[in-house]
């Protein structure tokens, strides 16, 4: 299912520059994360409307949980990226938008978790969700850096 219209609309609203046919980053989260976040926020609003009719505290709690999870999902989709800056450096942005520049030579290793991977770089960590979309350019540089350390992607 293509969500291009939804993505284009939200990118316009959030002020994300248009990249044309190019990917918006070298590692980013897919559009279904955005759609899921929007569904959660709409659900939160629905539970608030339900609360107005029933005055059930449970609906307020569910509404808050859905709203917070929806905002977190949208923040993850919007901010959690990796961009290659040069042949030797890349920029990692967390889901809250904190950006850190690393060099590929700083990569120490990769740990595979059940739902994601953790890339150990210098004194920091780069979190890569299992659903993340990565460009072949990023995968090649990552594989080369890990091969130099004795591992692979």
Image: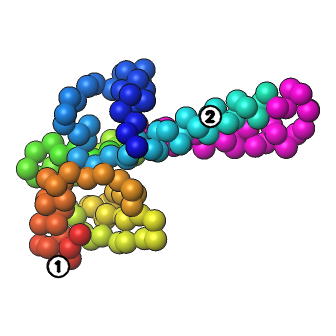
Helix, strand or loop status at disc 1 = loop
Q: Residue furthest front?
A: 1
User: How far from the left and from the top, in percent, is residue 58?
Assistant: 85, 43
In the image: residue 35, left or right of residue 90: right
Q: Please report whichever mark, 2 or 1, sits nearer to the chain's N-terminal start.
A: 2
Give the residues drawn in magenta, as a range.
50-78
In the image: residue 87, left or right of residue 63: left
Q: Which of the two residues, 77 or 146, is positioned nearer the viewer here?
A: 77
Q: Which mark is residue 150?
A: 1
Badge 1: residue crowd in 10 Å (few <14, some 14–19, many ≥20): few
Any part of residue 71 in sight = no
Which image quarter holds the N terminus? top left
What's the residue at 14%, 53% (across, down)? 137
Helix, strand or loop status at disc 2 = helix
Badge 2: residue crowd in 10 Å (few <14, some 14–19, many ≥20): many
What secondary structure is the magenta-colored segment mainly?
helix
As measured in the structure, the alpha-carbon distance from the residue carrying label 2 to the one carrying label 1 is 44 Å
Asked if residue 70 is among those painted magenta in the image, a careful observer would answer yes
């Amino acid at each position: 299912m293509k969500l291009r219209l939804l993505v284009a609309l939200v990118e316009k609203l959030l002020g994300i520059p248009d990249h044309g046919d190019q990917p918006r980053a070298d590692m980013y989260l897919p559009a279904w994360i955005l759609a899921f976040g929007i569904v959660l926020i709409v659900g939160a609003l629905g539970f608030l409307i339900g609360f107005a009719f029933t005055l059930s505290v449970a609906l307020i709690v569910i509404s808050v949980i859905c709203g917070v999870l929806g905002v977190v999902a949208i923040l993850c989709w919007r901010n959690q990226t990796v961009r290659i800056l040069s042949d030797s450096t890349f920029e990692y942005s967390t889901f809250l938008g904190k950006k850190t520049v690393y060099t590929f030579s700083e990569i120490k290793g990769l740990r595979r978790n059940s739902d994601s991977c953790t890339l150990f770089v210098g004194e920091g960590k780069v979190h890569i969700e299992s659903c993340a979309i990565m460009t072949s350019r990023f995968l090649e540089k990552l594989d080369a850096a890990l091969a130099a350390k004795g591992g692979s992607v």
